[in-house]
Amino acid sequence: MHGLINRAIQSFIIDTYGASRWDGIAHRAGLEMAGFEAMLSYDPALAPRILSAAEDVLDKPREALLEDLGTYLVSHRNTEALRRLMRFGGDSFLDFLHSLDDLPERARLAVADLDLPELELAERGSGRFRLSCRGGPAGVGHVFVGLLRAMADDYGALAYLELALASDEEDIIDITLYESSFAEGRRFDLGAQAL
């Protein structure tokens, strides 16, 4: 598994729950290293072990942890680069939804060997959509629910999202977009801001 995924889980836990909680989770998962290098590959069994340990240490269901991870990936100040990549999907949440089919290719422009699940958006009429996620690791649908909720907020859209199906082959997310301009979205500039 790509190190970016394990590193994202580690950063999420440290930024959300603290370094001491990460140390407890790493110990419980039997990790022999202090952390993950983003550009290395790791045994695919590590991420599920870390998530199981996090469930125990944090006393939180895996589904909730994964949704929180998805939200973290595009809303935390330490993950601004990923938010920027996502915002290149369009000027509105609706544009962003329609760009999801191209997200794996956009991600590979940034990280050539990163394999994201295949995404396919289907319109169902009256602001309703269905997003299919195929070929990802177990739980990827929960991550995308959290990510999409955060992106709806980022754009100022009012949307309802629900994981309709979670299986080994495919996760399906039902999306209802009630209002594209419900609230003022977060500021986004094409150029990166100097710190």
Image: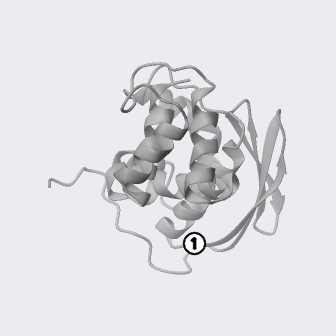
Tell me the residue at 51%/73% (across/down).
Answer: 156
Give x and y (percent) for residue 177: 69, 69
Tell me the residue at 52%/69% (across/down).
Answer: 153
**123 up-or-down from 139: above or below:** below
**185 up-or-down from 174: above or below:** below
Q: Residues within 10 Å of mark 1 (few under 14, many from 20)?
A: many
Tell me the residue at 49%/67% (across/down).
Answer: 155
Give the residue furthest to the left.
Answer: 195
Q: Nearer the viewer, residue 118 or 68?
A: 68
Q: Is residue 85 visible?
A: no
**7 up-or-down from 147: above or below:** above
Tell me the residue at 48%/48% (across/down).
Answer: 86
Give the residue furthest to the bottom.
Answer: 183
The residue to which callout 1 is attached is 157
Give x and y (percent) for residue 160: 71, 70
All told, the count of numbered labels is 1
Q: Nearer the viewer, residue 137 or 122?
A: 137
Residue 186 lies left or right of residue 94; in this view the side is left
Q: Nearer the viewer, residue 144 or 28?
A: 28
Q: Secondary structure at mark 1?
A: loop
The kind of residue tagged 1 is: Ala
Give x and y (percent) for residue 5: 51, 34
Q: Quadrant of the C terminus?
A: bottom left
Residue 132 lies left or right of residue 188; in this view the side is right
